[in-house]
Image (cartoon, helix red, strand yellow):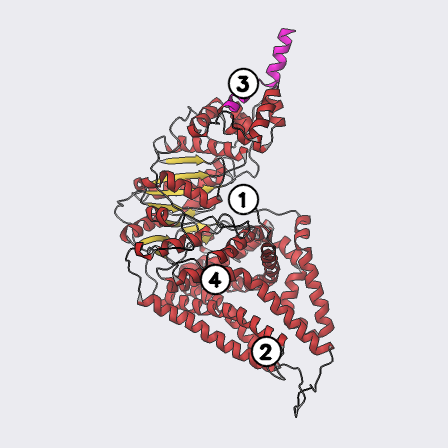
Amino acid sequence: MTSPIDTLRHGGRVALPFTKPCLNPPMPPESTLAMPEQGLRRYDPAHRPTRRSFDLATWFARLMIFGGGLLVTVYGATEMYGVVSVGGVTLLKWALLFLFVANFSWIALAFTSGLYGFLWMLFFAPKTPALPGGLKAKTAVVMPIYNEAPSRVFAAVQAIYEDVQATGVGDSFEWFFLSDTTNPDVFVAEEHAFVLMRERLGADVPVFYRHRPQNTARKAGNIADFVTRWGGRYEHMVVLDADSFMLGHAIVTLAAAMEADPDAGIIQTLPLIINRNTLFARVQQFAARIYGPVIAAGLSAWMGRDGNYWGHNAIIRTKAFADHCGLPHLAGRPPFGGHVLSHDFVEAAFIRRAGYAVYMLPVLGGSYEESPPSLIDLSARDRRWCQGNLQHLRILPAKGLHPASRQHFATGIFAYLASPLWMMQLIVGLVLVLQASYIKPEYFTNEFTILPAFPRFDAQRSLELFALTMVILLLPKIFGLLLSLIQTETRRGSGGAIRLILSAVFEIIMSALLAPIMMLIQTGHVVHFVFGFDTGWDPQRRDDGSIPFMAIVRRHRSHVLMGLLTLISGLLISPSLVAWMSPTIAGLVLAIFLSWATGLLSVGLFLRRIGLLTTPEEKVKPSVVVRANALIAEMGGARDEPEDGLALLYADPHLQTAHTAFMPRDRSRKRGVMTAEWALAYSKLNDAETVEDALAWLKPKERMAILNDGTLLRMLFALPRMETAIEAQRAVG
């Protein structure tokens, strides 16, 4: 009988067998830092250190971007008032005007920010700094993981580690996997991958692994646990996501920038999307690469040193983070109470409140991430972000926050409120057109007037305003396209000028079709949370792959129904109305097809073969990505379903030794104290006659209880195999 671990070794999934038990400590000695919970209703500015804050360039950028956005919004509001004021302004017309101004101000600000970013990138962007000769301080590079494919994350960190070592200053960094994994099979696979990684790199390499049995406070709690227990060892920490890649040059440059700027609390990079192959993900990848730099440059210009943090691919001053970024527990129940979900915005606001600078290096290359492979996967992630951003309504009025931090919160909140506002604008517009077409107007009211009140709109001005809105909406993308055409490396890496332009046109069409679907999805998320429903926190799908078609139908059937109702209503009112709303109607009617087609790997690969939606990083892959892919192949590929963890552990004595050595001493169960899962696991192990019995009976939470308890592990390891038990019975017989 071949054991699961033998299958793992000899079936091509793992290239290196264990040569000896790995008994080196999985973590370095603790060096604690206090991380007190921060208050929302109180803050004493007397404790804030005096730090430089005024910057003329930043204030000029704010004047141009926000002032320009205000002027464009006022102009649009004036034109819209001219459209609806013909014949008098009714209550519905006032509602339409309000909703239009709210939505128009959003795109006006994006336009002015994109314009400023385009000009800054064109004329003022600095060159990427050279590598420093050395670094003085120690930096921890931490990757929080939660039920991820171990081969992917361990390969990524090893590739990044090797690239940092190649810079010559690798001794200034130590590397941590911070696991909050709750899947017992993934937990064992993580330990297995960690042991193999240490064997590949050498026992003395500062690569460490820590597993928390409970993922309290989710990712924020994971990072806080590291900071409070080991943060005192490190001046800085670079935080990665499970899908992050960073070149050694980028990480070393961040560390050098932090050392050179003692006032800096967080320095953020601009992660570009890579490694994507489905059509949906490739559209996102192309948009981020072509339009992202312009948008990020404008954002960085007005933020200055009062910036934001996106939770990963950034460096943080550890002591300042511990002193000022302890997250409060919000009163009440989820979704608006409980743990802070979108913790990164809050941490940036708190560390800025303490006087430390938060800023971005928009031209620092070598920072990458991956994106969801399908519209449904994006929707699942977006739902978590929606809840987290709406939760910021509780934090927005906190005492002592910098005005720019409040602006970041407001922007994040409005990013999700914009969808229901847009939907309400469409509905009010439809009602007004329906009213004008089918409801008999009251031309002569009870008030004395010489002329009758005809309910009508200024059609010519309406068309002009619609054209203006479309231009302002598209100009940030056009700025990004123009910059990419000017930059030789970007233009050639994207397939040349013609393919780059065709790709941009294709991306704009796809975005226009997908936008109304996302409008309904985000509106549903907002309504969901307003009525008090919490969301889960399932791990994100990282790999390309299709979703079952019936799951797509169930997810989008309401969107198709909404599109058909809008189409029928529009045809009953006016064919010209249908033409005007055709992008919205088409996107909704085709929602099932679009979600299915854009999630297919074959469609994305076909476009890549003909040179559309390509990016420079796709033409010439970053070295860390190439190395990580090679390591994944050595380890047998990234598997969606891991092997049975307890079976692997039972079958391999070396893995047993490593797992036992890695278990913290403080994790032992106190006598008389037990969870339901522990008790059930104990009972099942006690009843089992063979290990096969136990593996068949044990449920995931019970398996986790075994993995975290020495007594239960010894009971598991003491069980015989079925064939051994049969042979023993025969011998007795």
Relative image position of residue 455 (x, y in whole percent) = 66, 82
Picture quarter with the C terminus: top right
| Nearer to us in this view, 460 or 455 | 455
The percent position of residue 175, horizontal first and vertical second, equals 38, 39
- Measure the C-alpha gap from mark 1 to mark 3: 34 Å
Q: Would you identify the image quadrant in which residue 128 lies?
A: bottom left
Chain part drawn in magenta: 711-733
* Amino acid type of the residue that numbered disc 4 sits on in the rendered structure: Thr
Q: What residue sits right under mark 2 in the picture?
A: 463
Give the residue type that dot 3 points to: Ala
Is residue 729 one of those drawn in magenta? yes
Residue 411 bears which disc, if any?
4
Find numbered disc 3 in the image and state the secondary structure of the residue it sits on: helix
Query: Local crowd at mark 3 within 10 Å, few (<14), some, or many (≥20)?
Result: few
The answer to whether mark 2 and mark 4 are in CB contact below 8 A is: no
Residue occupying the point 39% across, 54% down: 350
Q: Nearer the viewer, mark 1 or mark 2?
A: 1
- Sequence order check, earlier mark of 1 and 3: 1
**Figure check: 201 above or below 390:** above
Question: Do the CB atoms of the residues marked 3 and 4 lie less than 8 Å apart?
Answer: no
Point out the tag, 1 or 4, that comes first from the N-terminus.
4
The extreme bottom residue here reads 450
- Pointer 1 with pointer 2, Cβ within 8 A: no
Q: What residue does disc 3 label?
A: 718
Q: What residue sits right under mark 1 in the picture? A: 539
- Asked if residue 702 can be seen in this view, the reply is no
Real-space Cα distance between discs 1 and 4? 26 Å
Disc 2 to disc 4, C-alpha distance? 29 Å
